[in-house]
Image (spheres, grey):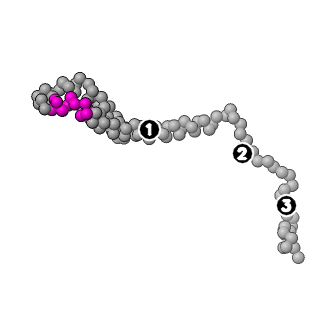
């Protein structure tokens, strides 16, 4: 459903941006039937206003496309993390001998416990 709305907004925005500057804008039924509408429609300010109205749905569609493509870009970065060409030894743990001493016969290991 979101994809259909995005396509609709994008198409509506492109039509509103481009239609006022085409020949179809000058030669339509309403422009030929009503001369005062034709005078209004050929005014460049009206054409610019209609094109300006096309920016909003086209911008909303581009924003939706960007929002829908962002998880795909995040998934693409996941594959870069699996690159084995770089060997980072972040999981290696240095082991030292005789750091941990075993307790025999339940001997206390702290001096203040000895009496």
Range shown magenta: 37-47
Q: Count neighbours of disc 1 (C-alpha within 10 A) and say few if under 14, some if 14 to 19, many if 20 or more.
A: few
Q: Earlier in the sequence, mark 2 or mark 1?
A: 1
Q: Earlier in the sequence, mark 2 or mark 3?
A: 2
Query: In which quadrant of the rendered view does residue 98 lie?
Result: bottom right
Above or below, comparing residue 109 to residue 99 in the picture = below
Q: Is residue 92 magenta?
A: no
- Confirm or deny contact between disc 2 and disc 1 (CB under 8 A): no
Q: Earlier in the sequence, mark 3 or mark 1?
A: 1
Q: Is residue 114 visible?
A: yes
Q: The N terminus lies in which quarter of the figure?
A: top left
The residue beneath circle 2 is 91
Q: Is residue 82 left or right of residue 105?
A: left
In terms of secondary structure, where does tag 2 sit?
Answer: loop
Distance from Cα at disc 2 to Cα at disc 1: 36 Å
Q: Is residue 4 visible?
A: no
- Confirm or deny contact between disc 2 and disc 3 (CB under 8 A): no
**Residue depicted at 37% across the width and 40% down the height:** 60
Distance from Cα at disc 2 to Cα at disc 3: 26 Å
Please name whichever residue, 35 or 8, is drawn nearer the observer in this view of the structure.
Answer: 35
The residue beneath circle 1 is 66
In terms of secondary structure, where does tag 1 sit?
Answer: helix
Q: Position of residue 78 (x, y in %)?
A: 57, 39
Q: Is residue 37 left or right of residue 19?
A: left
């Amino acid at each position: 459903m979101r994809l259909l709305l995005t396509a609709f907004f994008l198409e509506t925005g492109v039509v509103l941006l481009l239609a006022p500057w085409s020949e179809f804008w000058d030669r339509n039924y309403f422009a030929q039937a009503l001369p005062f509408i034709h005078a209004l429609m050929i005014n460049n300010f009206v054409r610019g206003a209609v094109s300006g109205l096309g920016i909003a749905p086209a911008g909303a569609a581009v924003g939706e496309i960007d929002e829908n493509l962002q998880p795909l870009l995040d998934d693409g970065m996941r594959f870069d993390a699996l690159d084995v060409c770089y060997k980072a030894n972040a999981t290696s743990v240095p082991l030292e001998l005789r750091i941990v001493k075993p307790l025999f016969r339940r001997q206390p290991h702290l001096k203040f416990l000895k009496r």
